[in-house]
Image (spheres, grey):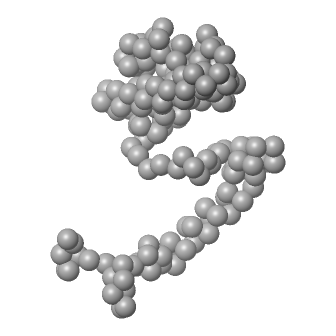
Amino acid sequence: MIPSSTRRSSRNGRPRRPSEEGNSGARRAHWASVRTAVRGTDQASRTPVRLSGRHALVAAFDWDSLIACPEPVLAGLAAGAFTDGSPSGADAPTPEETAAFLTDYDHAREHRFSSGEQALAAAAAGWVLAYNARCVIELQARGLIEPQQSSPAAMLDRHRDTYLHLRW
């Protein structure tokens, strides 16, 4: 139970929506800019995208996978899947490609990842590879796809310890 002194509620007693809280004008402006940013779509895949300048792609949004997590975890999840287009499509990233992705990401930041943050990113990369491997194994068991030498399952089988101990 939330103490009544800290509970956020409107005049009618129901919990307030974020847009009803203080500084609602700024919140509305922020969410309006987010909605504007994701209106464009890649017509082939129907993936919402954000374009900058002369149509340079700066972000892609997969609303089914929208998460909020610490930055090293998010970077690791992206690093563990950035080459993997689908279970039967592109290859899973090698440990070297994963480390290179994280190195590039880290260099673009204002402050470098600490050793603990690097461990978080490596664990997240390993997690997404394991999840994708589970999906591939299920599809193989159903006879829907053939085993691939560069699938997430095969890459983890060959390099499992290397993924977990990535540092850059």
Residue 88 visible in the snapshot = yes
Q: Nearer the viewer, residue 58 or 88?
A: 88
Q: Quadrant of the C terminus?
A: top left
Q: Can the viewer see residue 80 in this picture?
A: no
Task: Give the residue drawn at x 63%, y 13%.
Answer: 148
Q: Residue at x 34, y 27 (%)?
A: 119
The location of residue 17, given as percent across then percent down, is 44, 76
The residue lying at 67 percent from left, 58 percent from top is 37
Please tell me whether residue 59 is drawn above or below residue 13 in the rendered image: above
Judge by depth and name the residue closer to the eye, 29 or 136: 136
Residue 42: horizontal and vertical position, in percent? 77, 47
Residue visible at 41% across and 36% down in the picture: 72
**Image coordinates for residue 82, horizontal then vertical, percent:** 59, 29
Q: Is residue 35 above or below residue 121?
A: below
Image quadrant assignment for residue 16: bottom left
- In front: 112, or 162? 162
In the picture, the quarter occupied by the N terminus is: bottom left
Location of residue 117 by image quarter = top left
Is residue 28 toward the left or the right of residue 68 in the image? Answer: right
Q: How many marks?
A: 0
Q: Is residue 6 above or below residue 104?
A: below
Q: Position of residue 20 (x, y in %)?
A: 44, 80
Q: Residue furthest bottom?
A: 11
